[in-house]
Amino acid sequence: MSSSPASHQDMANAIRALSMDAVEKAASGHVGMPLGMADVATILYTKHLKYDPKAPKWADRDRFVLSAGHGSMLIYSLLYLTGYESVSLSDIENFRQLGAATPGHPENFVTEGVETTTGPLGQGIATAVGMAIAERHLNAKFGDDVVDHNTWVIAGDGCLMEGVSQEAITLAGHMKLNKLIVLWDDNNVTIDGTLDVADETDQIKRFEAAGWAVAAIDGHDPTAIDQALEWAKSSDRPVMIACKTRIGYGAPTIEGTGKAHGGPYGASEIEGIRKNIGWDHAPFVVPEDVLTTWREAGARGAATRTEWEGRLAASDKQAEFTAAMDRVIPAELADAMKAHKQSVSDGQDKKATRQWSGAALEVATKILPTMIGGSADLTGSNNTKTSSTGPLTSGDYAGRYIHYGVREHGMASAMNGMALHGGVIPYSGTFFVFSDYSRAAIRLGALMGAPVIHVMTHDSIGLGEDGPTHQPVEHLASFRAMPNINVFRPADGVETAECWELALARTDGPSMMVLTRQGLAPARSGDVSENKSAKGGYVLSEAEGDAQLVIVATGSEVEIALAAQESLKAKGIAARVVSLPCWEIFAEQDEAYIDDVLGGDLPKLAVEAGVRTGWDQWIGRKGGFVGMDSFGASAPYKDLFKHFGITAEGVVAAAKALV
């Protein structure tokens, strides 16, 4: 142990110095927030946060989310100072440079110790709500001895102005997530200037109105910070602490102004900060006594972790908890799904894929207790609730179904947080067109590789009378253009079950189930034991004799393609029908398989009730397309398909033009 530990001021100044030196060397970055929040972060990491740098993935650690992700040097400084191996002094010196563990915004897939990717403001606080939900749920299942930790957030004015924050705040208040603590960097400044140029919200009253416990403190007073954080840990509601700080703390000419937000500040301003905070060390130099005191603070969690490991080992729920955290899929799920598929095939019922999705979920949620469902106030339409998923509420955190309310964006963000926390498999539903409200969170989940399942029903003009505001036409194309998300559009009950199997098995990114409102005729029959959707696409119905063209379809349009195949046969034209439920998985197959399924040089015709964008990779520029090139209209769905020419007759006409 150090015989003379460094003072709080010196420890906070180490954060300030590393942050400003890194931004100055990179000639890029945001140093104002790290300068202002260094005191709060120091108290948090030295006295209250439960963590162990030697075991960054320890399951019962506190989660820390830097929602104001532009101030990334704050967390990089903390990780280095407390002894995480993921961030070296060299990484600090190479801030924002290619290959360094210190990218411009915190990335959970780059830097160990970073719990979630942040940058788009508001996403951090909304994601943290999901982490807090997961903690309360697992605590209810496994008890305090196994799960009992806090989720801490540093958020700025920008986070609280973004609309998603309102969804997150009200959801957290409604669910009484008392292990969620938000530290608001109350500095009264945004990039454009003082806050009053754009906002007059009383944030304390706002949080109070949403059911939070609130407090206001001097964010530069270590005693006040310490007392407030201690109080927050005993709250029976989520907590927001308004930490009054000065952005760009110590900067002689720009402290407290919009100019202090970003950097570099320039040599003169940096020299002035060093003088004003009493830091006379060279760039990137942290005195031995200061670094030692920081490392001792980082090491204090090792004993707590060891004690927890002992409690877990002694728990009769150890195996179940470990399986949940490892996202283990029970072997019996495959057999149960196989039996379900055969039952669907034998029955040959005509149902919407949203209904078949509900039927598959009934099977899956019974076997997988880690699945937590939900809906954005569309439970009956999305078919996401099953007999195994009772409500997850403040009165029963052990429940498995969340009524998210009309909060599509907050729902998607929370699911990211739940998946990142671990121990649960989150899925939830809304109408496909409302994915626009969720898009920022869905994109972030894809970037992070969060294994979340988004159920999107009412997938096309097939929803009918609600009209073009509710009819997605470009959405399939837009999400297929997004990297690292698997978009599933199954054709019937068998494919729907197969796609659910694939989504549940995925661990490195989100999946999206795109499902119909209208009933569909069965596409598969007979022995359906093989998961043909596992290759993304396959020959559903081979041509009689030598094929003259290939018709490729997804979802509800597979039914139309099969009807067109029969009509073409009567006209002497042999057509193969290919079902393509997941483009992303199909693209991963070898070229020989793709070429074989798509018929090599045979002319190709795509059928989908969406826009053509993206289809040329499968059918070529000269391929035919039957689909949408405009928004929809309000009418019964059968009238709409006829009006827009997405019919068997329309496919036959397009096919004849190709051959």
Image: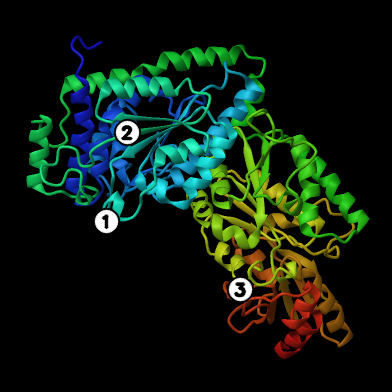
- Identify the disc placed on residue 243: 2
Q: Secondary structure at mark 2?
A: strand
Q: Circle 1: is it few (<14), some (14-19), or many (20+) Cα within 10 Å?
A: few
Q: Secondary structure at mark 1?
A: loop
The image quadrant where one finds the N terminus is top left
Q: Amino acid at mark 3?
A: Trp
Q: Position of residue 135 (x, y in %)?
A: 56, 29
Q: Circle 2: is it few (<14), some (14-19), or many (20+) Cα within 10 Å?
A: many
- Identify the disc placed on residue 615: 3
The image quadrant where one finds the C terminus is bottom right
Vertical placement of 468 versus 194: above or below? below
Q: Position of residue 43 (x, y in %)?
A: 31, 24
Residue at 35% of width from left, 26% of height from top? 44
Q: Which of marks 1 and 2 precedes in the sequence?
A: 1
Q: How far apart, in angstroms, are the residues tagged by discs 3 and 1?
A: 43 Å
- Identify the disc placed on residue 192: 1
Q: Position of residue 342 (x, y in %)?
A: 87, 50
Q: Which of marks 2 and 3 precedes in the sequence?
A: 2
